[in-house]
Amino acid sequence: MPRILYLVHNLSDPAVARRLAMLRLGGAEVEIAGFRRADAPLADLPAETVVELDITHDARMLQRLLVTLKARYGAKRWAKVLTRPDVIIARNLEMLAVAEGLLSLWDEPPALVYECLDIHRLMLRQDRLGRGMRAVEQRLMRRANLLITSSPAFLERYFDEQGAPPALLIENKVFAPGHDVVGRNVALDGIDGPVRLGWFGALRCRKSLAALDGVSRAMGGRLKVTLRGRPALTEFEDFHETIEAAPHVNFGGAYRYPDDLPAIYSDVHLVWAIDFFEEGQNSAWLLPNRIYEGCLNGVVPIALAGTETAAFIERHGIGVVIPDIEQQTLQSLFAGMTPERLRELAEAVATVGKRAFRCEAEECVALVSRLAAVAGIKRETEMAA
């Protein structure tokens, strides 16, 4: 059973709690240290020890840099409460810098794993800042034994060019042990009324909001759009005012993961899996949570051609891929969503095995086994064989 120290940039992130639960379900002992975002409570963290290093603020990169340096060079002080780990997992670049500062604290340095699930736009700039950021990452990755990422495109389009260590792909599948989160697309039973589209999760794309507002107006109520999740208010001129003025777009607020997934997805026929937040870069390469949540619940995904999301649904033979989100394209798409067409699309999703969209316990065991192997530890079952 490996001992893992998980360093995270945001202790308030529910995704951090899910990864911790995966590690523990896989058989690891976990301690955690990291930063908390201002005014955000700690997530429910199933860890033996939780060390809050400092508070950070959204969109304040200089402040985050300063607290990162403080945590790195103050590690000898705050790490006293920690057990010597077999593996350190550093989630995001800032925590990789902190992790490197920890390695010298023990006579036998732990294995180091770099977990990067998004490529920040700063890393992709072609100016001096971007080149400098990539140089820092490349230097820090030389100490890493393993890279964890969530999309093949991150490897093909970025990390393979950065001299990254061997990689482990862990998709953003629904992780909900003990929860019944498998729903059914209501289109399978026939529809009577407007086509219903859901856009759930991280709401940060102003282009999508404008396009969906525009096409739902043009269709005069034959398309209803529901938004659920947490809007990035800094990315919209006035999110709530736009919603109030949109006659066929409704915002239902945040939802509980995973408890609310069947309810919110069973209320729609289609899921919007398009995002222009970091157009042509991170948004084109990632595989969003909503693609797994929606497909697990039988909802038909809509993706943009040329993205990894489109490649994902095409590999599974499901969903709809469109070339753009121009009004004419969207009107043609939704006008063609007859009850028969929706049922056909929903049946295709229903035939795909749920393991493609849901993280099972054996995947958690495989993850921890890989981490143990990186640290040179054999699991008890292997030693007994």
Image (cartoon, grey):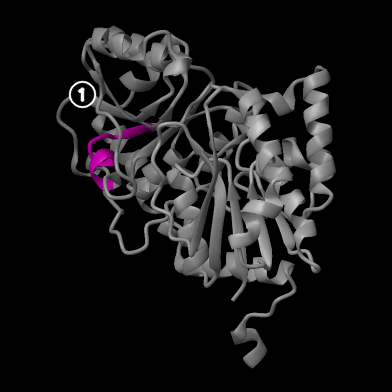
In this rendered view, identify the residue nearer to me: 246 or 271.
246
In this rendered view, identify the residue nearer to me: 231 or 216.
231
In this rendered view, identify the residue nearer to me: 321 or 174.
174
Quarter of the image containing the C terminus? Answer: bottom right
Asked if one can make out residue 321 in the rendered structure from this viewpoint, the answer is yes
Quarter of the image containing the N terminus? Answer: bottom right
- In this rendering, would 281 be left or right of 225? right
- In this rendering, would 137 be left or right of 43? right
User: In this picture, is 199 found above or below 100?
Assistant: above
Q: Can you identify the residue that label 1 sits on?
A: 194
Amino acid marked by disc 1: Pro
Give the residue displayed 43% in from the left and 13% down from the top: 236
Horizontal and vertical percent position of residue 165: 79, 52
* Magenta highlight range: 262-271
User: In this picture, is 137 found above or below 58?
Assistant: below
Q: Residues within 10 Å of mark 1 (few under 14, many from 20)?
A: some
- In this rendering, would 272 be left or right of 59? left
- In this rendering, would 169 be left or right of 179? right
Q: Quadrant of residue 175?
A: bottom left
Give the residue displayed 80% in from the left and 58% down from the top: 104
Disc 1 secondary structure class: loop
**Is residue 126 highlighted in magenta?**
no
